[in-house]
Image: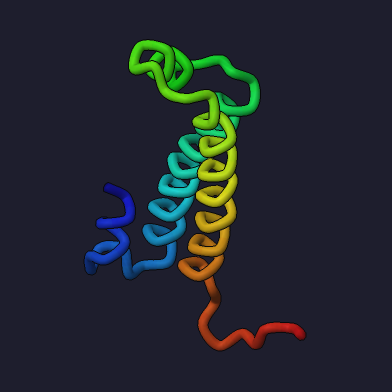
């Protein structure tokens, strides 16, 4: 929902944009981290669902990869959203 707020006119002010972006980042990173955490340590809600639905054991590796990919992608997206106009990137 916060990503939708970024596309509205209300998020054009810098303070609003920062707040909505950080709110989205916390939620995205929490979700991605929990997926990787569940897969790595075999605990949590995803494990319960996997047992009930009788998923193959490879779901854990898949969860770790997906969680880490979402984490990296989320970091890149937040960097893009929070870029400062007019600043040059160092090489």
Q: Is 40 rendered above or below residue 2?
A: above
Q: Nearer the viewer, residue 6 or 56?
A: 56
Q: Position of residue 6 (x, y in %)?
A: 31, 61
Q: Residue at x 74, y 83 (%)?
A: 90
Q: Using the image as rendered, state which of residue 52 and residue 21 is in the foreground.
A: 52
Across and down, in percent, residue 7 comes to: 27, 66
Residue at (49, 63) in percent of width and height: 77
Classify 34 as above or below 4: above
At a point 51% along the width and 49% down the height, the residue shown is 70
Residue 88 x, y percent position in the rendering: 65, 87
Q: Quadrant of the C terminus?
A: bottom right
Q: Nearer the viewer, residue 52 or 70?
A: 52
Percent of width and height locating residue 82: 51, 67
Numbered circles on residues, count: 0
Residue for point 57% across, 27% down: 39
Left or right: residue 3 versus residue 86 is: left
Question: For residue 9, what is the image quadrant?
Answer: bottom left
């Amino acid at each position: 929902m916060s990503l939708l707020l970024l596309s509205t006119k209300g998020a054009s002010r810098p303070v609003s944009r920062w707040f909505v972006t950080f709110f989205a980042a916390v939620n995205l990173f929490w979700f991605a981290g929990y997926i990787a955490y569940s897969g790595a340590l075999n605990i949590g809600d995803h494990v319960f669902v996997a047992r009930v639905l009788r998923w193959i054991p490879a779901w854990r590796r898949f969860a770790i990869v997906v969680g880490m990919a979402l984490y990296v992608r989320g970091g890149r997206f937040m960097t893009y959203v929070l870029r400062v106009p007019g600043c040059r990137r160092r090489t």
